[in-house]
Amino acid sequence: MVETALLVFLLYSVRLMGEFTTPNGPGKSLVFALRDIFTVANFFIAVISALIGYVVLEYLRKKL
């Protein structure tokens, strides 16, 4: 559970950093970026991606 939560955190932090790149437009506030990131669709994508990542990590741990 902790590993899955860490993966969700990493996905959201990468998404937040992407909000402040040059192509996304200068002058965005942190509140605007957080509203843009924390949506239901993004949450489901993050959870599904984290679960896939968890399965892959567990598989690699057992292989090694």
Image (tube, rainbow, N blue to C red):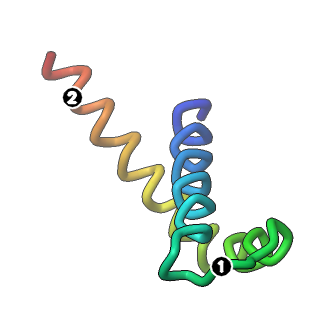
Q: Which amino acid type is shown beneath numbered disc 2?
A: Leu
What residue appears at the point 61 percent right and 30 percent down from the top-left corner?
2
Residue 17 at x, y percent in the picture: 57, 59
Residue 47 at x, y percent in the picture: 55, 58
Q: Which mark is residue 1?
A: none
Quarter of the image with the N terminus in it? top right
Which residue position holds label 1?
A: 26
Which residue position holds label 2?
A: 60
What residue appears at the point 32 percent right and 30 percent down from the top-left corner?
58
What residue appears at the point 53 percent right and 66 percent down from the top-left corner?
18
Residue 50 at x, y percent in the picture: 47, 51
Q: Which amino acid type is shown beneath numbered disc 1?
A: Pro
Closer-to-camera residue (56/20):
20
The vertical placement of 1 against 34, above or below, is: above
Disc 1, SS: loop
**Residue lying furthest top in this view?**
64
**Residue lying furthest right in this view?**
31
The mark that comes first in sequence, 2 or 1, is 1
Side of 34 relative to 52 (left or right): right
The vertical placement of 62 against 51, above or below, is: above
Q: Quadrant of residue 64?
A: top left
Q: CA distance from mark 2 to mark 1?
A: 41 Å
Disc 2, SS: helix
